[in-house]
């Protein structure tokens, strides 16, 4: 008969989050399949051949509010769309935790904020977030046209929730997209993300 400690360890293994290798710039971006706010199944592979931005968000986070209430995030999204860039906004908050929303709420948030993302993806189990080692809201990633990770980190170089800090800030996402569009190597491929901790399931 199995000992209690062995049974307990087995139970933990079944309930613990899956282990993921940390994403690496210059290597293939982690593949994923997840539902969007309309209940449609979306995958990274459907955007093959396009530049894709991944943005983690949480509407209750003051760092996210800094970028949305100022219109900074929407401006980036709409500018990227004009260049044919796909922008995927992800919510990895677990049920019962700050930022968790279901489809109708997510669509309401997007409409209220005038967000210009291509799709709003719901990741309540945190599978996509963990695959990308996403830690904060916002946490930004860019996948280039070859499917490789070209950028990961913060949205800019001002790790504060103060909207006044946007003036004169270096926007790493905008700069990286410009580099990719011009066929140049991304000048700052990795930076330190800042914001609220993503509210994953335990």
Image: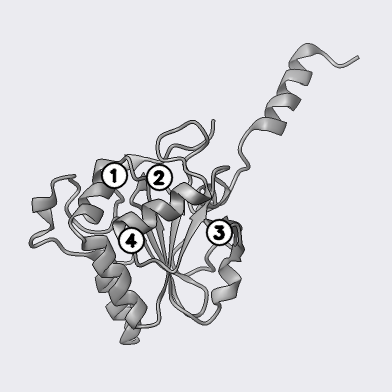
Task: Name above or below for residue 150 compared with residue 124.
Answer: below
* Numbered badge on residue 81: none
User: Which one is closest to the eye, mark 4 or mark 3?
Assistant: 3
* Numbered badge on residue 190: 4
Residue 85 in percent (x, y) is at 40, 77
* Numbered badge on residue 195: 1
The one nearer the camera, 95 or 183, is 95
User: Which one is closest to the eye, mark 2 or mark 3?
Assistant: 3
Of mark 4 and mark 3, the one earlier in the sequence is: 3
* Numbered badge on residue 38: 3
Picture quadrant where residue 179 is located:
bottom left
Q: Are marks 4 and 3 in contact (CB under 8 Å)?
A: no
Task: Name above or below for residue 82 compared with residue 174.
Answer: below
Residue 98 in percent (x, y) is at 40, 35
Rendered residue at 72%/32% (across/down):
14
Q: Are marks 2 and 3 in contact (CB under 8 Å)?
A: no
Q: Secondary structure at mark 3?
A: loop
Answer left or right for 40 relative to 106: right
Residue 91 in percent (x, y) is at 45, 49
Of mark 2 and mark 4, the one earlier in the sequence is: 2
Please count the marks in the image: 4
* Mark 2 neighbour class, 10 Å CA radius: few under 14, some 14 to 19, many 20 or more: many
Position of the C terminus by quadrant = top right
Q: Secondary structure at mark 1?
A: loop
Task: Name above or below for residue 146 compared with residue 17.
Answer: below
Colour mode of the rendering: one colour
User: How far is mark 1 from mark 3, CA to CA?
Assistant: 27 Å
User: How far is mark 2 from mark 3, CA to CA?
Assistant: 25 Å
* Mark 4 neighbour class, 10 Å CA radius: few under 14, some 14 to 19, many 20 or more: some
User: Which one is closest to the eye, mark 4 or mark 1?
Assistant: 1
């Amino acid at each position: 008969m199995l000992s209690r400690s062995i049974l307990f360890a087995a139970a933990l293994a079944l309930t613990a989050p899956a282990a993921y290798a940390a994403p690496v710039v210059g290597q293939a971006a982690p593949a994923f399949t997840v539902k969007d706010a309309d209940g449609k199944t979306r995958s990274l592979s459907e955007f093959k051949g396009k530049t894709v931005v991944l943005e983690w968000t949480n509407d209750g986070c003051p760092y996210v509010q800094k970028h949305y209430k100022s219109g900074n995030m929407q401006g980036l999204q709409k500018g990227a769309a004009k260049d044919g860039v796909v922008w995927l906004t992800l919510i990895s908050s677990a049920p019962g935790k700050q930022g968790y929303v279901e489809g109708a709420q997510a669509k309401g948030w997007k409409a209220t904020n005038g967000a210009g993302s291509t799709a709003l993806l719901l990741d309540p189990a945190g599978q996509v977030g963990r695959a990308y080692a996403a830690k904060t809201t916002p946490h930004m990633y860019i996948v280039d046209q070859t499917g490789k990770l070209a950028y990961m980190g913060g949205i800019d170089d001002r790790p504060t929730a103060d909207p006044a800090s946007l003036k004169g800030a270096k926007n790493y996402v905008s700069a990286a997209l410009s580099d990719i569009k011009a066929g140049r190597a991304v000048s700052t491929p990795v930076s330190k993300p800042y914001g609220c901790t993503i509210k994953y399931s335990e």
